[in-house]
Amino acid sequence: MIDGYTGASVRAAEQPLLDAGYGDILMRRAALGLSRVCETHLRRANRKGLLSGTTAIILVGSGNNGGDGLWAGSFLRRAGVMVTAILTGSKAHPQGLKALRALGGSVVRLEGQDEASDPNAEPDASIAGFHTVDRGQALSKLTSAHLVVDAVLGTGASGGLRGEVAALVQDFNAFQRTSPTGPRIVACDVVSGVDADTGEAPEPVLKAHATVTFGAAKVAHVVAPGEQVSGQLTVIPIGIEERLEDPSVFRLEARDILKAWPRPTPTDTKYTRGVLGVVAGTPSYPGAAIMSTNAAVNSGAGMIRFLGDATTRGMVLAQSPEVVCSDDQPWDVHVQAWLAGPGVADDESQSARVQAVIESPEPAVLDAGALTPAAQAVADGRLGAQKILTPHAGELEQVFEWLKGFGVTDDAPDRDRIEAAPVHWAREAARLTGATVLLKGATTIIASPGSDEDGVEQVCLSIGQASPWLATAGSGDTLAGILGTVVAHVAEHPDALRNLGAWAREDGRWAAAAALGAGVHALASRVDGEGPVPPTVLAANVRKVLRTTRQ
């Protein structure tokens, strides 16, 4: 499991050591770790695997992030790398600057950046004498290097890159798009311009092949869009780890998912393993019912009760004869949990069943056609953490429109805003609806509602192993069936996921269950490597994933 922390929490953990005079030690530890990762990339860039003769350019900001970069440059220089630092601010970390220059590193200033960031700024006396390069000259240095280290902005920055350095990054990105072989990019702590606390990545950003961060992973490293521009993550311990408070986001990895997935014991029965009720599909959209029930079967549900019309029931049985099908109403059958909404549109009977599921006390996965009535139901009160909403960004936009229409919120973000800050909006949706929210995307975010009145903090998790080939019709129906299976088990066994952590108990268990379902779905998408994964194949892959020995 990777814990994602806010920049503020990491800085708070560092502060006692800084106050005690250990700032230089922390910086040198961080820089040494950064330089080691840079060396690995430089050796790959050199056909002989040597550091001698390789070149590295370090984009250096005014703060401590730039200091880390300068110190790392000095270690690289000592190893035989030709290093040039391009200063992008009105000052530079003096000790790092001195260390790099003492070992023969070159230092230049980016022309016009001081004026662009602050027209009234006067360059610090320690850098006033350095030769300046214009944007074109700087670009030439970047494009001809083996490695570029992004050390412009750190965790305390906000608002993205500005001025000449922003224009330089834009020009470099244009070069990267047309060049089959360019320099490797390593980001220092976070990709410059990416918000460490939210993952927001206002353009332009210098997309990294690797990011080296210090003390702990930041939220931006485990959520979109920050994760998508960070590359391979390396966390360097620097001595603050035991001082960190609770993380803001938990990232479940494959070993966490496989270890925590509920598995039957010798004393279990089909009822104790979890009975899942499914309201999905209509005569117009029977495929959703087939795919969601098939996924639940392959996920190991103890029993599945499908409610729907005769035609759809026949098609479900033809695919999965173990499913118990009827035209009953939700209040007529006993289940541990419900799945409602996939493929439900313009059908009065199924819509009525969906409404009954929303109003029922049982836990429920509310997907697709259930999202709008669930949002409408918030006007009459919070849904409860045991109700799990599963929108993608476009569907969440519609949920917010309904919430705004009912006066629950004044802000209804559009899809672009949601995709730019998925953690924020998933948390906000959970808070406003009282439900657990699973926001589907390149990185899936799961947020619990929490409770200000009871002092219960929101739980936030991320899942990121999914293949981009999952972006296909029917994939969400398969996910819904997997989710329903694990939710039904957790409903029957409330402490089933307690080993994940204290946060996975009480109301947090629903977020944990949703994360496990999304994780298995993601792992199933890569069982056979990269390539198309039709939902019918994806459901079968779930069995392969769950047969994997616990790691």
Image (cartoon, rainbow, N blue to C red):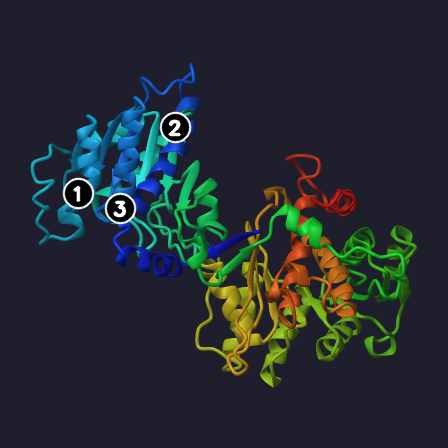
* Mark 2 / mark 3, whichever is N-terminal: 3
Give the residue type at disc 1: Pro
Q: Position of residue 295 (x, y in %)?
A: 78, 53
Task: Name the foreground residue: 63 vs 309.
Answer: 63
Residue kind at label 3, given as amino acid type: Asp
| Residue drawn where x is 7% and y is 36% of the image | 129
Q: Which residue is depicted at the point 32% across and 55% down?
A: 17
Q: Relative to 475, does residue 88 appear above or below in the rendering?
A: above
- What residue would you read off at disc 3? 24
Badge 1 marks a residue whose secondary structure is helix
Does 460 sit above or below residue 91?
below
| Upstream in sequence: badge 2 or badge 1 | 2
Could you say which is closer to the camera, residue 160 or residue 74? 74
Q: In the picture, residue 526 is in which quadrant?
A: top right
| Residue farthest to the front, as pictured | 20
Residue 108 location (% of width, % of height): 16, 33
Q: Indicate the position of residue 267 as horizontal and vertical percent values.
A: 89, 61
Q: Quadrant of the C terminus?
A: top right
Which mark is nearer the camera, 2 or 3? 3
Residue at figure coordinates x 62%, y 42% from the top left: 469
From mark 2 to mark 3, how far is it between C-alphas?
22 Å
Foreground label between 3 and 1: 3
Q: Disc 1 marks which residue?
A: 94
- Per the image, the residue denoted by label 2 is 39
Query: Where residue 276 sits: x, y (%)?
Result: 81, 65
The answer to which quarter of the image holds residue 15 is: bottom left
Labelled pair 3, 1 in contact (Cβ < 8 Å):
no
**Does 336 appear above or below 394?**
below
